[in-house]
Amino acid sequence: MAGIDGFGTQLKRGDGGGPEVYTAVANVTSISPPGLSRETLDVTTHGSPNGWMEFIGGLKDGGEVSADVNYDPSEHDSLIDDFEDSEPRSWQIVFPDDATTTWTFDAILTGLEPDAPYDDKLTASLTWKVSGKPVLS
């Protein structure tokens, strides 16, 4: 069988302690894990074989993480503090697979966009910028 049901995936916020203790963010409806990317450095020379450009890998970027929640101001008030904080916080995404695979990363909350339509539930879209290397374990 191919694929894993995403139901049960958790987004967890670290408390900044040592050891770090993670608490699940309430009412998460969608999570997009780190989107990794890497720069390339052009190392083409006049002697590059057959006139083909050559590249090597450059700096890596942990990208961004995003999540949507059913917004409850009393449940999500700590996110306002995170938005005000300029220091990265530790986060985890825990997948519902048999191995309980986890992405752990430090990130800065860069976007908090609540929505309160007159005919639907309160929601919020959240975005974090990853700082450093995310660890998949």
Image (cartoon, grey):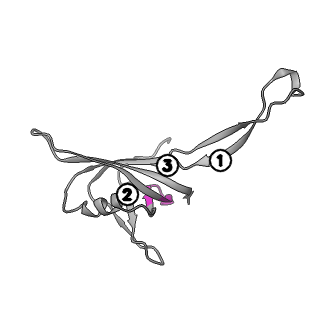
* Pick the front one: 99 or 52: 52
**Residue at mark 3:** 34
Question: Residue 45 location in percent, x, y?
Answer: 84, 30
Q: Is residue 48 left or right of residue 64?
A: right
Label 1 or label 3, whichever comes before in sequence order: 3
Q: Name the residue located 50 percent from the left edge and 41 percent from the top edge.
A: 2
Asked which secondary structure carries label 1, the reply is strand
* Pick the front one: 40 or 25: 40
**Residue at mark 2:** 10
Q: Is residue 52 left or right of residue 9?
A: right
How far separated are the C-alphas under marks 2 and 1? 29 Å
The boundaries of the magenta stretch are: 92-106
Q: Residues within 10 Å of mark 3 (few under 14, many from 20)?
A: many
How far separated are the C-alphas under marks 3 and 2? 14 Å
One can see residue 96 in this view: no
Q: Name the residue located 49 percent from the left edge and 53 percent from the top edge.
A: 130
Q: Amino acid at mark 1?
A: Leu
